[in-house]
Amino acid sequence: MAVFKKSFTKEEALQKLKHYCAYQERCHSEVKEKCYELGVWKKDHDELISKLIEENYLNEERFAIAFAGGKWRIKKWGRNRIRYELKQKQVSDYCIKKAMKQIPDEEYEEVLKKLLLEKHRSLKADQWIIRKKRTIDYMIRKGFEPELINSFYPSK
């Protein structure tokens, strides 16, 4: 038995997309994906996205800044991870650079130091070198730059 998805008209889809974008900041690729989910014809995607941009429902720069700020403040992700995630969402390099400027260097270094110490202390391995490697791996996964991690790593 085949299941058919309901297809929306252009006007209905525009209303749904406006609600989707008003709920939280979105990037172009997320809106395009939503168009597919709504069953909108591919030829209409660009027109709908243009309308959303014109009416200021969709703004990639605003999305990038909100995304970077949120991931930094809430999840304590490093710049590399944030940059990678934004690239995955097909955000432009210009918007990514703008978003990265929202993270103050002093605060970034303070958080890095704090996370390094917390992680190092939480590990149970007896050997200092094993704890160091696991801590550095964790920090790299969080998106911090290896050079910075090494420069702030506490000595024995």
Image (tube, rainbow, N blue to C red):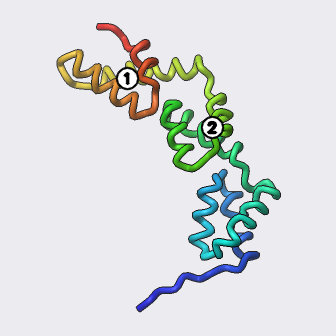
In-image side of 16 versus 39 (left or right): right
Residue 48: give x, y in percent of width and height: 73, 66
Residue 22: give x, y in percent of width and height: 71, 57
Mark 2: few/some/many CA within 10 Å (<14, 14-19, 20+): many
Q: Residue at x 50, y 23 (%)?
A: 111
Residue 145: give x, y in percent of width and height: 46, 24
Asked where in the image residue 129 lies, by quadrant, the reply is top left
Asked where in the image residue 65 lies, by quadrant, the reply is top right
Above or below, comparing residue 65 to residue 132 in the picture: below
Q: Nearer the viewer, mark 1 or mark 2?
A: 2
Image quadrant holding the C terminus, namely top left
Above or below, comparing residue 23 to residue 60 in the picture: below
In-image side of 68 versus 133 (left or right): right
Residue contact at pointers 1 and 2, CB within 8 angstroms: no
* Residue on which the image places disc 1: 118
Q: Residue at x 59, y 20 (%)?
A: 105
